[in-house]
Amino acid sequence: MTLSFDNPPSLLRHDDGQRQLILRLARVDDAEAVVEAAQESLAALREFMPWPHFPQTVEVQRKRLAGLEEGHGTGGDIVFHLFEEEGGPFVGCIGLHRRALNPRAFEVGYWVRTSAAGRGIATLAARCAVVLGLEYFACQRIQCVYNEANAASGRVVKNVGFAEEGRLRLFEDQPTDEMRSNGYKAQPMAVMNALFSEDRERLDWYPGVRSALTVLDRNGSVAMPVETLGRSSVDRKV
């Protein structure tokens, strides 16, 4: 059976001999680590994300993560927690979200804790997600939207090689006055970007990340790319 949103991988391991990055499905028992990282990064997160403006407790995160775990394997969003080595500390998160109308598409979202910022973690995680989508999910489209005021997120989009498609006014819910006073900086305009299967040939990073990436299914076995399995094995939906 091929990987898909109904059959997501349990883990992605990037190891090119120089650096590692582990993308592991989010779990309820990550709640304390997520809260600790969010508290550390609260000032940065509040600039462009609504959720840090609400109380971040272990109980709140356990409830959220339980919902994510339930959704993994039932077509819900896929969320991976990021680690720079096996058994290492939680450094961030990347989500594959079903926000596109195309059933063979998803949207990438990410955040990295403040103490791990500037090391290219979000860029590498997004590149791994692109390889997963194109090679293992047979995606037709992978999109990424960032707020025009979020320069750091824009750099990630550029480093991955997403192409800008347009600017969307009021794509996101607008903040309250209280959120503004607590540091929210997002502007009304969001930037839509996308990648497609044919873009693989122009991305100079793609062959290296693809060869360095090991993808494990829910049983812990190494999963095979769609082209290895044969296109006829691909399910109708991602």
Image (tube, grey):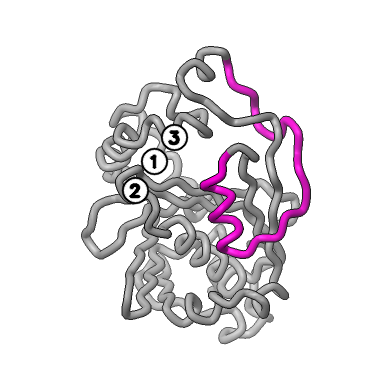
Near-viewer residue (91 or 67): 91
The amino acid marked with disc number 3 is: Leu
Q: Quadrant of residue 213?
A: bottom left
Q: What residue is pinned by disc 2?
A: 27
Q: Residues within 10 Å of mark 1 (few under 14, many from 20)?
A: many
Pick the residue in front: 201 or 101: 201
- Marks 2/1: CA–CA distance: 6 Å
Residue, disc 3: 45
What SS does tag 1 mark? Answer: helix
> Is 12 positioned to the left or the right of 161 in the image?
left
Q: Identify the amino acid type marked 1.
A: Leu
Identify the image quadrant of residue 60: top left
Magenta includes 162?
A: yes
**What residue range appears in magenta?**
150-176
The residue singled out by tag 1 in the image is 65
- Give the image location of residue 72, x and y in percent: 47, 52
Residue at position x 43%, y 72% in the image? 215
Q: Earlier in the sequence, mark 2 or mark 1?
A: 2
Q: Residue at x 23, y 58 (%)?
A: 88
Q: Is residue 234 above or below residue 55?
A: below
C-beta proximity under 8 Å, tags 1 and 3: no
